[in-house]
Image: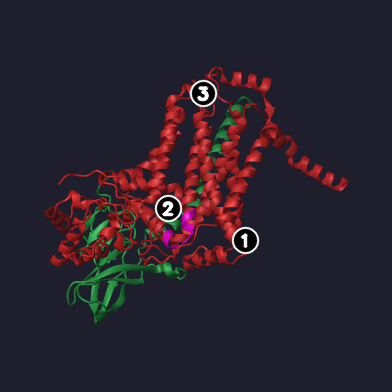
């Protein structure tokens, strides 16, 4: 025991641990820094999960061509604990994104970004965007059909940039097409470039926390005045401050344990995201979908008018980054209490509502044709007339139901046709089907006269009545 | 070298300034020597475009006139370890005895794979609902342009498609 103590003492003396690190751990923080302040350290904990599980996965993952897919199958189905590790890496990424956003929201609501912590905020914003970059590149390393097509979509988006767009797109792809060099690029970015930036960013972020101290809980009576803030902060710390370790840090450790339990629990009970089909760019049956943190962006892209699309695709990330970075420049003094900052509270409420609504919308993606739609059952057709029955078959066969819903069956891209017989007359139906219009293609070339007649006959029977299992909502009817 | 005692301070300052600039310059040189080759290496796919290649996608008899079929072939930039990822596809439509159109499978909106719905005679994109007619013209949805076409030819009864880059949507709107 004495021998070990002497070795530890020697290491401490030569490394300067007690002289340098312990004062940092024991630096005095406001005693009001309680449960609100645990999200930053929990984000760091999630990052540690990512680093450790990522290193373990990298010992087996083969970042190249179809071997990547095979190695993912091995990790998921055969390697001991491989399924758990993939799950931990996935839910760790989810935790990191969620906790970083919560941490940022807390800092924004409490105006902790004001003097003298402006650079803390700015470094945090950059870190958030790098974390999102990690999430995106990580999704692509799940190198299945979805991964291949997500790279293609990313290259297409970048390709819209003026002048340099094609060069950026080809740099992303590692050539003019998806191929052997594509995945290796994203692997290098995901495991070397972005983690390096995150390590550097965290180092700066923590250094700034030590330099300027942890902000206190905001009080209406304590607005920030840059001329006097530091003296007042030091004076308050002297009176009521507590050492970070262990008086304040125990909450961080307790919360980090909860986060770890959640990550491991989700990995055990839900498992990692399922792998799709193999990464074959000639497989056209893929339905590219980003991971959930980008569903809101996916939804925005679907709603944009074409003339705005390029500007939003290229501009939104830049505007988002710059918009968040300049927050402390817009106001770095004055009130910090949320009760005195209604615009800040409103921004958070509006932002989160929009995020949730768009995320749900992105998940449902009603703008996409539903290729898996089933034929209408007899209970919905509700007729034995051969023309009506044939018309119902045609509505499915010709792809109308990919976009239109009839009595609960079909896609959601176009208007519901459950009561179309009440809204359009026979000639109007014929014109609409033949000519298309309102973002609907013309079917004149793919329907014979007899088929058109049967289809119209069927559609005329759709009058919004109660049929089958569902009650048909009449919706916004237009009179004939 | 300083010749007089009272010139020592000025002389030392000049020396420090010189060494400061020398060290910064040399550090920059070392940095450039470290960074430039890797940057050029990473960007090398932007130069030296691979030669395009004609790929045999099947005999004439496999493609009835008026039909549209998916053909799969290897692209030109395949690397030894690419495996399945070296594959690419095209929708091949036979419009006459020796006439074909080869459409890119990439939607012109954001590059997702379009599907041919034979009964409707439409190409449809699963991502944002882009729809194209059988001649590739935009029928509905957000695509700003018609489907891209690949060069196609018939040689000795075999249909050949020329490998091409992934068509990037133009930035005309910017």
Give the image location of residue B107, x and y in percent. Answer: 30, 58
Whether callout 2 and callout 1 share a subunit is answered: yes
As rendered, which of A312 and A472 lies closer to the eye? Answer: A472
Q: Which residues are magenta?
A: A138-146
Q: Nearer the viewer, residue A191 or A440?
A: A440
Q: Which chain letter goes with mark 2?
A: A
Which chain is tinted red?
A
Element under disc 3: loop
Ranked by sequence position, the earlier of labels 2 and 1 is 1
Q: In terms of image quadrants, where is residue A200?
A: top right
Residue A337: give its label: 3
Earlier-in-chain disc, 1 versus 3: 1
Q: What distance separates the C-alpha of mark 2 from that of mark 1? A: 26 Å
Could you tell which of marks 2 and 3 lies nearer the N-terminus?
2
Q: Is residue B30 at all visible to an observer of this figure?
A: no
Residue A81's disc is 1
Majority SS type along the magenta span: helix
């Amino acid at each position: 025991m004495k021998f070990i103590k002497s070795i530890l003492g020697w290491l401490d003396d030569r490394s300067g641990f007690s002289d340098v690190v312990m004062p940092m751990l024991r630096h005095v923080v406001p005693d009001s820094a309680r449960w609100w302040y645990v999200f930053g350290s929990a984000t760091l904990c999630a990052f540690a999960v990512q680093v450790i599980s990522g290193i373990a996965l990298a010992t087996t993952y083969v970042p190249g061509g179809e071997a990547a897919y095979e190695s993912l199958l091995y990790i998921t189905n055969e390697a001991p604990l491989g399924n758990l590790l993939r799950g931990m890496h996935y839910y760790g990424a989810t935790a990191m994104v969620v906790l970083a956003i919560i941490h940022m929201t807390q800092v924004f609501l409490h105006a902790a970004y004001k003097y003298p912590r402006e650079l803390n905020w700015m470094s945090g914003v950059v870190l958030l965007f790098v974390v999102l970059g990690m999430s995106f590149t990580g999704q692509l390393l799940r190198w299945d059909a979805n991964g291949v097509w997500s790279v293609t979509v990313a290259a297409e988006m970048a390709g819209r940039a003026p002048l340099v767009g094609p060069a950026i797109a080809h740099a992303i792809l590692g050539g003019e097409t998806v191929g052997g060099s594509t995945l290796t690029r994203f692997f290098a970015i995901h495991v070397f470039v972005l983690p390096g930036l995150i390590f550097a960013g965290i180092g700066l972020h923590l250094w700034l926390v030590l330099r300027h101290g942890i902000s206190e809980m905001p009080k209406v009576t304590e607005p920030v005045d840059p001329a006097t803030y530091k003296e007042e902060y030091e004076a308050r710390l002297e009176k009521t401050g507590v050492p970070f370790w262990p008086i304040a840090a125990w909450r961080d450790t307790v919360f980090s344990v909860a986060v770890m339990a959640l990550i491991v629990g989700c990995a055990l009970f839900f498992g990692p995201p399922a792998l799709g089909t193999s990464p074959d760019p000639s497989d056209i049956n893929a339905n590219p979908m980003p991971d959930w943190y980008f569903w809101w962006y996916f939804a925005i892209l679907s709603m944009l008018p074409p003339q705005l699309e390029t500007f939003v695709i290229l501009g939104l990330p830049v505007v988002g980054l710059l918009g968040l970075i300049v927050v402390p420049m817009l106001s770095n003094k004055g009130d910090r209490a949320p009760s005195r900052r209604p615009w800040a509270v409103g921004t958070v409420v509006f932002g989160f509502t929009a995020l949730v609504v768009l995320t749900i919308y992105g998940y449902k993606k009603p703008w996409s044709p539903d290729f898996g739609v089933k034929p209408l059952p007899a209970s919905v057709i509700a007729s034995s007339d051969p023309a009506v029955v044939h018309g119902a078959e045609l509505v499915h066969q010709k792809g109308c139901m990919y976009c239109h819903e009839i009595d609960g069956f079909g896609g959601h891209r176009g208007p519901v046709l459950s009561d179309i017989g009440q809204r359009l007359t026979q000639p109007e139906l014929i014109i609409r089907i033949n000519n298309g219009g309102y973002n609907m293609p013309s079917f004149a070339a793919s329907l014979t006269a007899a088929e058109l007649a049967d289809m119209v006959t069927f559609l005329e029977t759709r009058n919004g009545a109660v049929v089958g299992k569902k009650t048909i909502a009449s919706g916004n009817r237009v009179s004939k | 070298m300083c010749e007089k005692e009272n010139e020592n301070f000025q002389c030392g300052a000049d020396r420090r300034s010189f060494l400061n600039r020398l060290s910064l310059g040399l550090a920059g040189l070392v940095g450039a020597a470290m960074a430039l080759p890797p940057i050029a290496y990473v960007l090398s796919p932007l130069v030296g475009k691979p030669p395009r290649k004609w790929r045999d996608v099947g005999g004439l008899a496999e493609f009835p006139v008026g039909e549209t079929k998916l053909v799969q072939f290897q692209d030109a930039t395949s690397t030894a370890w690419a495996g399945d990822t070296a594959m690419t596809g095209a929708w091949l439509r036979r419009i006459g005895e020796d006439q074909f159109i080869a459409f890119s499978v990439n939607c012109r909106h954001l590059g997702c794979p379009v599907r041919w719905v034979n009964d409707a005679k439409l190409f449809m994109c699963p991502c944002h609902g882009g729809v194209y007619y059988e001649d590739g013209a935009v029928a509905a949805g957000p695509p700003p342009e018609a489907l891209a076409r690949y060069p196609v030819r018939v040689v000795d009864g075999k249909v050949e498609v020329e490998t091409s880059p992934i068509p990037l949507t133009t930035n005309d709107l910017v």
